[in-house]
Image: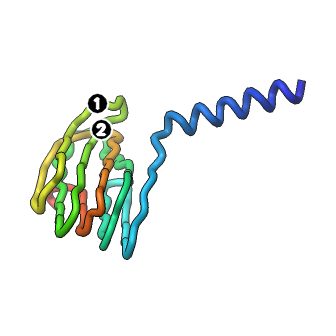
Amino acid sequence: MKNAVLKIICVLVCVLFLFCGCDSYRAFMSIESGSAKSWSQKHDMLDGRKSHVLRLGANETDMIIDVVTEEGEVDISVKDSMGNEIFEADNAETGTYSFSASGKVKITIEAEEHRGSVLVKKADS
């Protein structure tokens, strides 16, 4: 009986890890700061995937993404809690991008030897 319960728990944990979309990255000289409403990531080199969940509340909120790309490439995506794409920028260049969202959103950056920064915050702050 104990073996059966242990096997079920192990299978559930494995399934959880498969569907969680865990981050996998390597970074050099990296500084990250995040809260429920903002996220910033500055790095001399980032390679791989990093993500952060924002909790924006029930009302639609105007957000901005400030990107600095000195070298390399960075793709940025924003998805709602249902997995629907709200915003996407492939090979984002230095600049400011905007989107509107409410509720829980997941910001994901996919970097290839990127040097620079990504800042996500409310448009009015």
Location of the C terminus (image quadrant)? bottom left
Q: Residue 25 occupies which quadrant of the picture?
A: bottom left
Indicate the quadrant where residue 48 lies. Answer: bottom left
Dot 2 surroundings within 10 Å: few (below 14), some, or many (20 or more)? Answer: some
Q: Is residue 42 above or below residue 38?
A: below
Is 119 positioned to the left or the right of 29 in the image? Answer: left
Amino acid carrying label 1: it is Asn
Residue at x-position 37% and y-position 76%: 29
The N terminus lies in quadrant: top right
Q: Kindly identify which residue carries mark 2.
A: 79
Q: Residue at x 45, y 41 (%)?
A: 21
Tag 2: amino acid: Lys
Describe residue 35's horizontal placement relative to residue 77 as left or right: right
Front position in the image: 16 or 102: 16
Q: State the mark number for residue 84.
A: 1
Say if mark 2 contacts mark 1, CB within 8 Å: yes
